[in-house]
Amino acid sequence: MPRAASTSDPRRWLALAAALALAGCSPPPERVEQLLVFGSTAEIRLRDADPQAAQAALAELSAELNQRHREWHAWQPSDVTRINQAFAAGQAVQAPESVLELVRLAQPLSVATDGLFDPAIGGLVEAWGFHTSTYPILTPAPRDEVLAQWRQDRPHITDVHIQGNQLRADNPRTQLDFAAMAEGVAASQAMATLQRHGVRDALVNLGGDVTALVGEGLPPWRVALRDPFGGVIGTVELSDAESIFSSGDYNKFRYSAAGARQAHILDPRTGHPARGAASVVVLHPDPVLADVAASALFVAGPSGFADLARRLGLGCALMVTDENELLVTVAMKARVTLARDPVPLGAPLDLGPSCVATPED
């Protein structure tokens, strides 16, 4: 696995879903670092940071992200692939603490989403050809009988058991793939590392998913949201300890036999790529919940958007459907400045004025 690549050139911007610009006038000095990790480019932007503290924080952060890459990768040799091999053989297997923590975090989130988020479906992801960095996928789709058998013997993350420092799966078809939460967990750890080194004003961009620190008296960070139909659909300002995560059909996809674009986000209920949504954006203080919720809402689709947002307490969420329709919460509508106007699909969902609503059972 390649080691992290790093630069300090502030002229370079990521070619990602989020285009970033400072809000307000006369911004403080800014430093930009780029790291190659999780199969894409991570960008860390620091404002008005002490040079020595920033250097120490970035060195530790680079090492941490590379370590997580070696532990979490779903198809290149890693601790996760080693664990999956043991599961297939019906064996318990030792796991690093970071993977044990992913399982601990994933299980209640999978229950909360009624299994729409389930990192035990790595075998299904592989069957659809999405264990790759080359898109679009050109390999044939899995046969109907393969998917029917998978649905019959579907694995669940709740059937993975932690025994000390070991993991055991009840179902040998269990294959872990934490892509729908890895960046959220990594963002949470990255912000903790920066704060531990005294960095108080930063933006961490992991593959287009963004988490912010805003120092006292400094302006918010302004983030542009990618339009699934091309360009930028709008902007939002992030305050301290806020994260914005998105899922869409625009980067990682394949084409159906009819020529329709199929996202890499799979519906565990059907075994097929999720349908109905083109993009989902979630704004929340918890980057792990934001990451998981963006994927789960994409799977839920337009018909399940309101129910799942309400159950997860997502005060700030929006969906652009594959028909260019807009579903949005009241609080999210107040935060986002739209650059164009998709067709409203009903009135905004009122879950309160805050991005943190009270989850419903």
Image: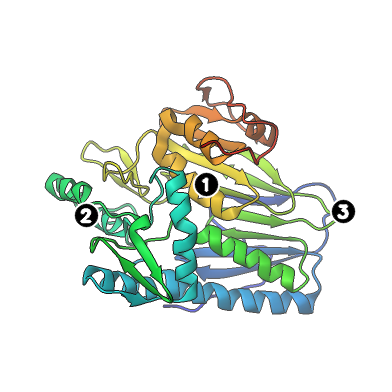
The percent coordinates of residue 344 (x first, y second) are 53, 22
Which residue is the site of mark 3?
A: 217
Which labelled disc corresponds to residue 139? 2
Between 226 and 117, which is closer to the camera in this rendering?
Answer: 117
Q: Earlier in the sequence, mark 2 or mark 1?
A: 2
Q: Secondary structure at mark 3?
A: loop
Horizontal and vertical percent for residue 78? 38, 75
* Side (left or right) of 200 relative to 131: right
- The Cα atoms of the two marked residues, 3 and 2, are separated by 52 Å
Identify which residue is drawn at 43% across, 47% down: 111
Residue 117 appearing in the image: yes
- The residue furthest left is 145
Q: Quadrant of the N terminus?
A: bottom left
What's the distance in space between the residues labelled 2 and 1, CA to CA?
Answer: 26 Å
Q: Is residue 132 left or right of residue 243?
A: left
Residue at 54% across, 57% down: 184
Judge the density around disc 1: few (<14), some (14-19), many (≥20) Cα neighbours within 10 Å: many
The three-letter code of the residue at mark 2 reads Thr
